[in-house]
Image (cartoon, rainbow, N blue to C red):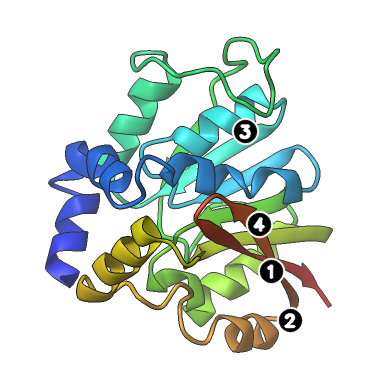
């Protein structure tokens, strides 16, 4: 399964949206957008931006996002989407949203070694991240590049409610090795990096979206 997910994020990145749609019954992007109300300030860095859906949503919400991702394939997909090559539906939380403002910058780099100055961002956001998010080097970088009053918002996964579709998805996530909604050790690793954490749940249909908000101590 690790090989499958590596291919999905690299050589098979062109199938990512379809796979994400299938394993969430079309709710994947909405789950990720649950992070937006928790963002602080306008200067936002998204770690592992993927195909760029959240970058577009943040831009249309009036924020100034920057995307960071190691995958060149995801960078290409996001660039096409940001340039308007892939149609985007109206966003339900901002019906008056207009076209994209200045196109967000995309940076290819590792989260463990971000090419930004200290205190560069108001918020760092990451939705459904892989294990890199609990790497001490990543968390130290997060603590370094957010401003003293900044925060990190992580959507590690969802908790399924009791319904037939939810039970099916829970089973699917189990057989694919994704049954743990949060990377193990997230709270402990954040504390070691000098960050405090609060967790929230956002009810969205058949799931609760899990949201972690970290701030500097």
Taking the image as drawn, is residue 39 in sight? Answer: no
Foreground label between 3 and 4: 4
Quote the CA–CA distance across marks 4 and 2.
26 Å
Image disc number at residue 134: none
Residue at image mark 1: 143
Identify the secondary structure beneath mark 4.
strand
Pointers 1 and 2 in contact (CB under 8 A)? yes
Q: Quadrant of residue 22?
A: top left
Task: Quote the CA–CA distance across marks 3 and 1.
Answer: 22 Å
Which quadrant would the N terminus be assigned to in this image?
Answer: bottom left
Residue 150 point in image, percent of width and height: 79, 57
Q: Earlier in the sequence, mark 4 or mark 2?
A: 2
Residue hosting label 3:
58
Identified at 46% across, 34% down, the residue is: 53
Location of mark 2 (residue): 194
User: For mark 4, what is the residue?
Assistant: 202
Dot 3 or dot 4, earlier in sequence? 3
Considering only order in the chain, which callout, 2 or 3, is on the residue closer to the N terminus? 3
Whether residue 158 is situated above or below residue 175 in the rendered picture: above
The residue sitting at 14% across, 62% down in the picture is 4
Foreground disc of the pair 4, 1: 4
Q: Nearer the viewer, residue 27 or 87?
A: 27
Q: Earlier in the sequence, mark 1 or mark 2?
A: 1
Cα separation between marks 3 and 2: 27 Å
65 relative position to 69: left or right: right
């Amino acid at each position: 399964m690790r090989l499958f997910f590596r291919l999905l994020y690299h050589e098979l990145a062109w199938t990512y949206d379809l796979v994400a749609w299938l394993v969430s019954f079309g709710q994947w992007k909405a789950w990720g957008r649950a992070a937006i109300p928790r963002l602080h300030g306008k200067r936002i860095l998204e770690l592992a931006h993927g195909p760029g859906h959240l970058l577009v949503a943040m831009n249309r919400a009036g924020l100034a996002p920057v995307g960071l991702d190691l995958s060149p394939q995801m960078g290409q997909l996001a660039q096409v989407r940001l340039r308007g090559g892939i149609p985007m539906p109206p966003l339900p939380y901002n019906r008056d949203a207009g076209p994209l403002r200045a196109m967000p910058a995309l940076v290819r780099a590792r989260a463990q070694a971000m090419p930004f100055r200290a205190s560069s961002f108001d918020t760092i956001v990451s939705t459904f991240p892989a294990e890199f998010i609990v790497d001490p080097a990543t968390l130290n970088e997060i603590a370094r590049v957010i401003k003293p009053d900044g925060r990190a918002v992580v959507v590690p996964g969802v908790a399924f409610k009791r319904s037939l579709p939810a039970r099916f998805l829970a089973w699917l996530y189990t057989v694919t090795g994704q049954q743990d909604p949060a990377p193990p050790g997230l709270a402990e690793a954040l504390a070691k990096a000098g960050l405090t954490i609060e967790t929230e749940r956002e009810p969205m249909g058949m799931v609760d979206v899990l949201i972690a908000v970290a701030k500097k101590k």
